[in-house]
Image (cartoon, grey):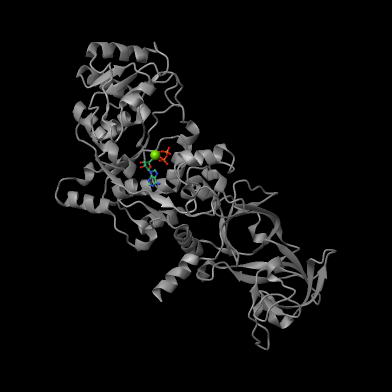
Amino acid sequence: MPDASDTASDNAPNFIHEHIEAELASDALAASALCTRFPPEPNGYLHIGHVKAIWVSFGTALKYGGRFNLRLDDTNPIAEEAEFVEAIQQDVRWLGYDWSDRLFFASDYYEQLYLWAEQLIEAGKAYVDESSLEQIRTRRGDFYHVGEDSPYRERPAAESLDLFRRMRAGEFPDGAMVLRAKIDMAHKNLNMRDPPMYRILHARHHRTGASWCIYPMYDFAHGQSDAIEGISHSLCTLEFEDHRPLYDWFIEALGLEPRPRQIEFAKLLLSHTVLSKRRLRQLVEQGHVAGWDDPRMPTIAGMRRRGFSAEALLSLCERVGVSKRDAVVDIELFEHLQREHLNTDCPRAMAVLRPLKLVITNYPEQQEESFEAQNHPEYPEQGTRSLPFCRELYVEREDFREQAPKKWFRLAPGREVRLRYACLVTCQEVIRDEDGEPVELRCSWDPTSRGGTPADGRKVRGTLHWVSARHAVDAEMRLYDRLFSDPDPLGAAGDGDFTRLKNAGSLEVLRGVKLEPALEGAPAGARYQFERLGYFAVDPDSTGHQPVWNRTLTLRDSWAKLEKKQRA
Ligand code: ATP
Ligand code: MG
């Protein structure tokens, strides 16, 4: 698997920028004429690959003072839904791009496209073919064999025109015939072997309703839609390279000016996941995830819900750059950039995921006090908050060990630790349930250690997070792991079904998680770093009675460690 990250630097090369700078410098292009677009088909939610496509198209226009359009390429009424149209807009906006009033739909151009199709028929450059789809497929040939002309290829233009009009009028059932471009059945590029332009589909469209029963093929709509909008640069991924001659052929045959110029770049792929709406749709429809915005999904909606930052997504694009070489981005790099951003962005708070009660036996039952805690250690200007403290607290179950090795600096019988911002406590006794599991630690505290430093200045290495049992807020916590343990799930699945490789442990739900009281009522989308645990965000499922949080990431940054090692 090639790896994009090995060539990544803070300023990765971007051949499209170089290209446009050259055009601007040579006066071949005026900044005012620069116009790009992002053209998703509304048949699913956008994913991290689209973040790159949006960043390439919109980012380039912004950088050089051009315009950019959002266009929904909605030529397939069967797969497309209004829900996706809405979701796409919300996601692009969340990334921070404002297309102003330049939202377009390929379906807005249906009438114009239809007229152009008639024009090509009249010019002898398109014909109606009544062969079956199967016949069309077999006569197309393949890479090694030239195609074979259809028996309908030489029919008079007037006959094709008549049939085409009757196709539109709804006289024929689905699949009865198609309109094809008349190009070259021996062309070495299979896309040029008389590709279909229109098909009959008696299906309701999410925008045009029942007005049409013929629909343009994506390849016929795409380039002309660009031309209608005055797109100067159609930036798209490499799989469209083989379609470019066809787009150019249509534009030329129709005599459209100025011509959109298509430039292809490599996709962004991510390890441990699958992209492409088709596959993500399979995960959703077969119930492998809870929906398009499941926080394990590489969709923009899923990543937003998980608590990932839009800014860090865009900085990943900067890091990887734009080239013609397909490459897989290591998910560790993605997570590293998120952590870097979240670390500066998120205020700190305390939560205990798997609570174990800690009772301070020499602290009076009725007494309470509070300790000052910093909201952000690197930004003192963000101030402090007070943490209530009393005789009963919760600490993390895994911060206690009965049999602790010498280098264990957390809780164990007889060991002293610091409770962050509060004081020093020593574990005196362990209460167990009938299975022998510890359920309560009975500890003593040093009243001279208020704030964390004892009067005699003795050193204590371990510092733990905690919350006051009396004041804690209960929450549900959803912990996520990678959706696929294998870095290359499609490769590993081979011809088999990739969904079988889903990581069964990719979601763990914890109930009865204890949060510090300041977090009560935190709104959906709010993000915090829970001390020692990681980054967390409030889920939209959260309610006043039952707060729900998502763990965005743990704090363990293996990418940063690797980088440090490489530098050393
Ligand atoms: P489908 O499986 O339905 O083809 P898709 O994920 O390829 O879905 P499209 O709607 O075909 O999505 O793509 C919209 C635009 O996004 C296209 O211009 C395409 O070039 C670009 N794009 C798609 N996937 C990626 C990716 N992984 N990296 C960068 N750009 C992408
Ligand atoms: Mg695609």
Residue 57 on image: x %, y %: 32, 46
Q: x and y percent of residue 80 in the render? A: 46, 31
* 476 sits to left or right of 481: right
Q: Nearer the viewer, residue 466 or 155?
A: 155
Q: Residue furthest bottom?
A: 456
Seen from this angle, which residue lies furthest right? Answer: 434
For image coordinates 81% across by 74% down, the residue present is 364
Q: Is residue 8 visible?
A: no
Q: Is residue 143 above or below residue 93?
A: above
Taking the image as shown, residue 208 lies to the left or right of residue 33, namely right
The picture quadrant where one finds residue 248 is: top left
Q: Quadrant of residue 414?
A: bottom right
Please identify the quarter of the rendering in which residue 33 is found. top left
Judged left or right of residue 349, residue 416 is right
Position of residue 419 relative to residue 549, above or below, is below
Q: Is residue 86 visible?
A: yes
Q: Nearer the viewer, residue 64 or 336?
A: 336
